[in-house]
Amino acid sequence: MRSRFSAFAVNDAAYLLRTWHPTTRPPRIRLDVQQRWSRLDVLGATGGGLLDTEGTVEFRAHYSVHGHRGVQHERSRFVRDAGAWVYLGPVG
């Protein structure tokens, strides 16, 4: 989760796509270069351990765009794909 937040912060769309599960990954993403990601608060997590194959992370990601502050609040699902953790999508 933290690495994906960092990728948003530095506008690394290629990394975001590489860490997105192939069944839910869009063909491309367009990041707003005016959007500045400033802080990630991880509120909770389930699974995700060494022997787990899935897990969830609840987070708040703080950003600003064009002088307006905002927060992305999500509970995300991650799964292992070929040994690597990848983003599957939001829960529910």
Image: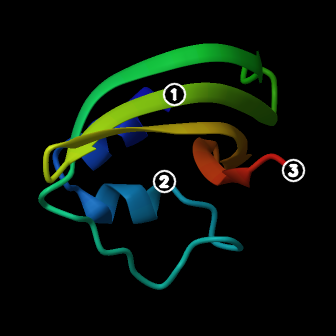
Number of the front mark, 2 or 1: 1
Residue 49, position as x, y percentages in the image:
73, 17
Give the left or right position of residue 60, taking residue 85 as reference.
Answer: left
Q: Mark 3 points at which residue?
A: 92
Q: In this rendered view, identify the residue nearer to me: 28 or 61.
A: 61
- Residue 57 image offset from top left, x and y in percent: 67, 28
Quadrant of residue 14 within the rendered picture: bottom left
Between the residue at mark 2 and the residue at mark 1, the CA separation in whole angstroms equals 19 Å
Which of the marked residues, 3 or 2, is nearer the chain's N terminus?
A: 2
Give residue 25's quadrant in the image. bottom right
Q: Going from the N terminus, do you reach mark 2 or mark 1 first?
A: 2
Q: Distance between the residues labelled 3 and 2?
A: 20 Å
CA–CA distance in space, label 1 to label 3:
17 Å
Towards the viewer: 71 or 79: 71
- Callout 2: 10 Å neighbours few (<14), some, many (20+)? many
Total marks drawn? 3
23 or 62: nearer the viewer: 62
Q: Residue 19 carries which label?
A: 2
Question: What residue would you read off at disc 1?
Answer: 60
Residue plotted at (72% across, 18% down) = 45
Q: Element at badge 2?
A: loop
